[in-house]
Image: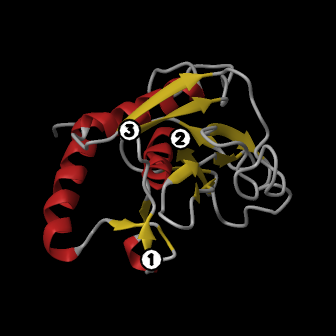
Amino acid sequence: MKRFSFEQLLLVVLAVLMVTAASAHAFVCLQINGHCVRWTQGGTTLHSFLGNPGTALINGTFSWDQNAVNAGNDWNAAGAAFHFDVGVGGNFINPCGAQGPGHACPNTGPVGDNPVFFADSFCGHGFGDIIELTNNCANSSNGAMLNAPVFVNSTVSWNAYDGAIRVVNNQVIHDIRRVLVHEFGHVLGLDHPDEN
């Protein structure tokens, strides 16, 4: 049986979604006051603060951060008129806090700051059954995205791998790259089509 790489599988899935989008509206934008949320610059920079697991991951990478970079590159390879730059590390600014100086929206941090990081809660609120959460902040008058931090639930099991979802001792081992590709879709301004 022929095995497909993650990149090949992603490209096939994106191609199918793009074809489907034309007729079935498979892509749905996040909206604020009737405006589709979008980045006005044609791209954005994310900073991964995920670190290292201390051992090689199943897909052969040695850091969570490398999988964040790879997820951004997966989107870049899709041919959209949008570009992710994913850096590793830097000055971490905690996005949790009320709107005001240093926080463009509640729990988002300053304008242009898009950290990707592990957290045991969403600013003190439990994740429930959510494994990651992107908290988009946009200008309410025109939909221009201001920032979009990605909170990765540190209380669930993670690894990085291709293929079927893995379960060990009745516990799902979440694939960080696959889930980051999904979350970066939210950073881009996409919503779940089944929730509108």
> x and y percent of residue 160 in the render?
50, 35
Label 3: element kind: loop
Please state which amino acid type lies under the numbered disc 1: Gly
For the residue pair 24 and 12, the one nearer the viewer reads as 24
Q: Nearer the viewer, mark 3 or mark 1?
A: 1
- How packed mark 1 is, by other alpha carbons closer than 10 Å (few <14, some 14-19, many 20 or more), is few
> x and y percent of residue 85 in the render?
45, 28
Distance, label 2 to label 3, CA atoms, is: 10 Å
> What is the quadrant of residue 113 in the picture?
top right
Please state which amino acid type lies under the numbered disc 3: Asp
Label 1: element kind: loop
> x and y percent of residue 14 in the render?
24, 51
- Quadrant where the N terminus sits is top left
Viewed as shown, does residue 28 lie left or right of 56? left
Distance, label 3 to label 1, CA atoms, is: 38 Å
Visible residue check, residue 5: no
Distance, label 2 to label 1, CA atoms, is: 32 Å
- Quadrant where the C terminus sits is bottom left
Q: Which mark is residue 45?
A: none
Q: Which mark is residue 176?
A: 2
| Residue placed under numbered mark 1 in the picture | 34
Viewed as shown, does residue 167 lie left or right of 73? right
| Residue placed under numbered mark 3 in the picture | 162
> x and y percent of residue 158 in the render?
61, 41
For the residue pair 123 and 91, the one nearer the viewer reads as 91
Viewed as shown, does residue 48 lie left or right of 166? right
For the residue pair 10 and 105, the one nearer the viewer reads as 105
- How packed mark 3 is, by other alpha carbons closer than 10 Å (few <14, some 14-19, many 20 or more), is some
| Residue sitting at the far bottom | 196
